[in-house]
Image: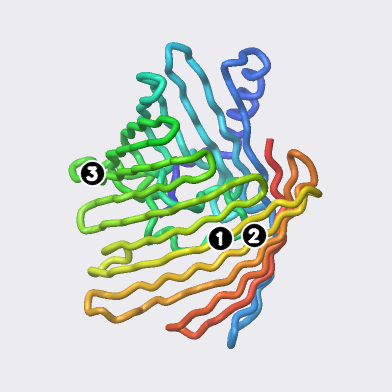
Amino acid sequence: MKQFTKLTPVAATLMLALSTTAVQADDKLSVGGFIDMSYLAVDTDGGASTHNSGVDQVEVNLGYDFGNKLTATVDVEYKNSNDGANVEQAFISYAVSDNLSIKAGRFLSYSGWETEEPTGLFQYSGTGYAQYFYGYYQQGVSALYSSDKFAVAVSVVNDLAGPQSTDSEHPGVETMVAFMPTENFTVKGFYSVDGDTKMLNTWAAYSKDSLTLAAEYNSSEDTAGAGSEADGYLLMANYGFANGLGLTLRYHDYSIDDATGNTFEDMSAITISPSYTVNSNLLMVFEYRMDSDDIGGMDSDSIAIEALVTF
């Protein structure tokens, strides 16, 4: 599913060099990104232990403001599991008004509490259930209307989770409604349809001072194929201390049934994740995670250390 346009290493290096030169000459071009590296040890009951370390992901984000309310965004990434660099996102945006904007190209779905990128996570790992309940990178057109207390979005895409799909005969549709009754509280709901696939994602978050609380509920039909049904949820709390230390606690659970109602995947996990902000560019994340597999019986414990550099 995670296939993007490939760039050769030479082309990727040239693109980065040209963009850096352009930044020095034109303040309309912005460059950012991150370097993500980690050590991960997993101990599975009845199985072998694994130890992996290295650079997980490098990403460069390029943005250009043409003026006249038109902007362009291109994200280039390298992942250790891929061969070379990839174009992750590439889209243009037009601000119809202060509240309404339209974008077209390849972009990430709005859905899901947990982000696709490590820079948006409160801990090292994602739940692992995003493939059943969230949209992914998509190609199409999306409109967003937002105000201080309300937002709505509609995306019409070739595939809810197909970044390279070009078949638009039977498009997928993703809708979002969001409410922000106060500056500390947000509620969002997403309903997406693509053929027989239907996904519902809802989450609420409360954030004040150093405390963030979040809860998410999901359900879907046919995301695992063969008429399957799935549901899942998470509960999360994060607190940031004054000395740069942070702590995240998370519990998540999900299950998938086949067309006959038999459960073939039933997973849950408890995650404890301290973190330390070394400076404005370097974040260290530590994680201890306990996974339970109620169907396969392959319970596991994992320990991770992550260094995340943003620029």
Instruction: Work out whether mark 1 precedes mark 2 in sequence or the reverse, and give the earlier one.
Output: 1
Q: Residue at x 62, y 28 (%)?
A: 31
Q: Contact, CB < 8 Å: mark 1 with mark 2?
A: yes
Quarter of the image with the N terminus in it: bottom left
**In this rendering, which labeled residue sits more in front, label 3 or label 1?**
1
Whole-angstrom CA distance, mark 3 to mark 1, is: 34 Å
Secondary structure under tag 2 reads strand
Q: Observer-nearest residue: 300 or 237? A: 237
- At 29% from the left and 50% from the top, the residue drawn is 192
Q: Which tag, 3 or 2, sits closer to the chain's start? A: 3
Q: Is residue 19 above or below residue 129?
A: above
Which circle marks residue 236 in the picture? 1
- For this rendering, which residue is in front, 239 or 65? 239
Spatial CA distance of label 1 from label 2 is: 7 Å
Say which amino acid is labelled 1. Answer: Met
Q: Evaluate whether residue 40 shows in this view.
A: no
In front here: 111 or 128? 111
Q: Which residue is mark 2?
A: 248
* Residue 311 in picture, x, y percent from top left: 68, 35
